[in-house]
Amino acid sequence: MNNLAIYTKELTRLYKTRALRKKERVVQALAGVDLTVNRGELFGLLGPNGAGKTTLIKILTTLLSPTSGEAFVLGLDVMRDYRRIRPLINMVAGGEYTGYGLLTVRENLWMFGQFYGLDLKTTLNRIDELLRVVNLSDKANTKISNLSTGMRQKMNFVRGFLTDPQVIFLDEPTLGLDVGAARDVRRHIKDWTHQSGKTTLLTTHYMAEADELCDRVAIIDKGSVLACDSPAALKHQYQQGAIFDIRLSGQPSPSELDHIKETQGVKSLTSALQDGQTELRITLDQESAIGPVVSSLTANDVSILKLSKCEPTLEDVFVGLVGRGLGDEGEDRDGNEE
Ligand SMILES: Nc1ncnc2c1ncn2[C@@H]1O[C@H](COP(=O)(O)OP(=O)(O)OP(=O)(O)O)[C@@H](O)[C@H]1O
Ligand SMILES: [Mg+2]
């Protein structure tokens, strides 16, 4: 266990809440999570809202106690050895509001460096270097109360890497960043982890982000890990049959779509209307089932503009495991009546 960056065994966390004049409710945010993350790994937790990702990160960063089970970071127990863990790790959460508004970006970052006992020269060098990474150098002397949301997020990102931690926890690191900034941040996460041999655990809703960045991904839903492997292995393992994207002129009627869904060999079908054209994504038991689908489509009053076979994405893996898309609402786990 000492050679692992993160190890959890049957980790469980319940939250008890009581609204005014209502019975106490218990939410199971983590339901027996077993996880191992190797040192030097870039590991992703992928799951919908409320899956338990932040709860897991809070326990691993010693901010929250587990209800039961075990959790170790760098071989240290999060409950017993939290004082030894804290100097070795750092955490950035998307949308967090840290720092003093009256201090400038550089002053705030220097202050955080002081909390970790960094020497002045190292601190200032790293601040300059990291501000360049996120393209924020021109705001170094701006008070942080005058930053936009995205700029603040960039500063938080710098704060996380400033201490060059052994393990960094990033809870939705690209939240609120524009496309270019998100790309810079992703590139830095990848380079830092792979060049330094240190460990990154990040959470994200973005399938493409998890796919592009992570050495391994745990798909988590309702407090449980449903699958854990490299993105390529996950896609391979859950690749059943064949997936086709079909673009149609016009819009098939609901009954026509139902008819296609019932065609032998069709496992699932999603459709979306875009610019007067229809995009279908069809999962088949086997590739040959595409023949009857094409026949029934062309028998109707639509023509096929494009038909392509696709590689499965992590989204397809997620739908296969959970039975719904990542963006779709799950059932309410805490019995909320509102
Ligand atoms: N402080 C709290 N008190 C009560 N319930 C909580 C608390 N924090 C989280 N929960 C509940 O625990 C469950 C897991 O929440 P968590 O924040 O860990 O999810 P998440 O995967 O980070 O979601 P998101 O993608 O929205 O950030 C949810 O049902 C949530 O309502
Ligand atoms: Mg969260």
Image: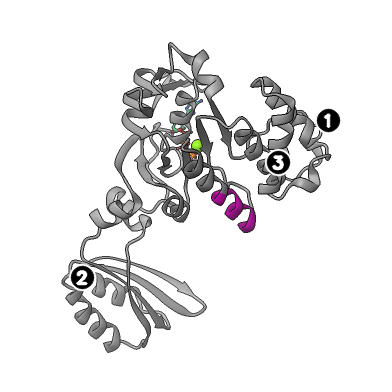
Identify whether 254 is placed above or below 163: below
Identity, as a three-letter code, of the amino acid under mark 3: Arg
In front of the other: label 2 or label 3? 3
Q: Are marks 1 and 2 in contact (CB under 8 Å)?
A: no
Label 1 CA crowd tier, 10 Å (few <14, some 14–19, many 20+):
few
Q: CA separation, marks 1 and 2? A: 63 Å
Which residues lie in the magenta part?
178-187
Q: Nearer the viewer, residue 336 or 208?
A: 208
- Residue 48 % position (x, y): 43, 44
Identity, as a three-letter code, of the amino acid under mark 2: Glu
- Residue 72 % position (x, y): 39, 22
Residue 262 circle label: 2
Q: Quadrant of residue 106?
A: top right
Identify the residue at image location x=36%, y=28%: 4
Classify the position of the N terminus by image quarter: top left
**SS at mark 2 in the image:** loop
